[in-house]
Amino acid sequence: MNLRRQIDDAISYARRDILASLAREPLELNPSDVWDVRSKLHVLHHYCIKSEIPVDIESQIEVALEISANLWRLISESIDNVGNLKDYTNVRTLSAESSIIQEAEEILSGEDTLRDVIIFGISFLLDWKSNTIWVDSAKKGRKIIVRNYLMELQDQLWQFIKGGSQNGVISLAKARQIGRRADQFLLLISETGLPTEMQVVMLIRLYALLLRLQLDRIITSLDKANPNNEE
């Protein structure tokens, strides 16, 4: 089988069998859904290893596996609270949900930068806070979960940023600026007075978004490697 056919098959599988499985509201995902996505990612990873597809795509799939593992653990640990989490979102007006969906679609169209991810998170938080007066409902155990996953999210957000930074060198000042923006974004989740349950909602949404963006990046990389695109 030649490289062109291998890449076409990989792209078709990534789009039809993996990315399509994530085309839903993140809070509707259950551990079995994410497990299924991970199984398909392992299939794609094995296929790429055993084919002539460029090695760098294998590493991108490994990143997607890491993100999906954290998403699976977070949903599994929050499964008893999923009903409450849905109630939180249902209390809100539909304006926040519609703006999130619109921005997510714009991001997934190809502008998968740190700026887009930050805009996505900030717009959700500001809209939420401007329309809601919250009573403190934080629980100590859930606070610990949020803190642990924030650390994981920091690493995977940076992994995503580094994976897209292949257009030459940057200055240390620029790298520090990116670091400040990433930290400010993550702190929005933990230090804006949101109840712990809402922080979990944000984490689930962001892990699901990062996973979709990483899959979009994999498909883009596969497409670039296709001999059909070489003139």
Image (tube, rainbow, N blue to C red):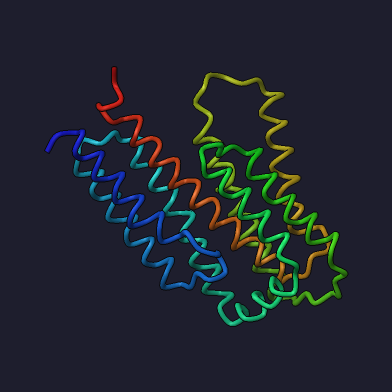
Residue 61 lies, in percent from the top left, at: 38, 47
In the image, 103 versus 126, the foreground residue is 103
Q: Tell me where residue 189 sits by quadrant.
A: bottom right
For the point 51% across and 62% down, which residue is it?
71
Residue 80 lies, in percent from the top left, at: 59, 82
For the C terminus, the image quarter is top left
The vertical placement of 97 against 84, above or below, is above
Left or right of 187 on screen, residue 205: left
For the N terminus, the image quarter is top left
The vertical placement of 61 against 89, above or below, is above
Q: Which residue in the rendered view is the most extreme toward the left?
A: 1
The vertical placement of 198 against 102, above or below, is below
For the point 51% across and 33% down, which residue is it?
164
Residue 192 lies, in percent from the top left, at: 82, 58
Q: Tell me where residue 93 sits by quadrant.
A: bottom right
Residue 78 lies, in percent from the top left, at: 59, 75
The vertical placement of 41 against 58, above or below, is below
For the point 36% across and 50% down, which residue is it?
15
For the point 69% across and 78% down, which residue is it?
87
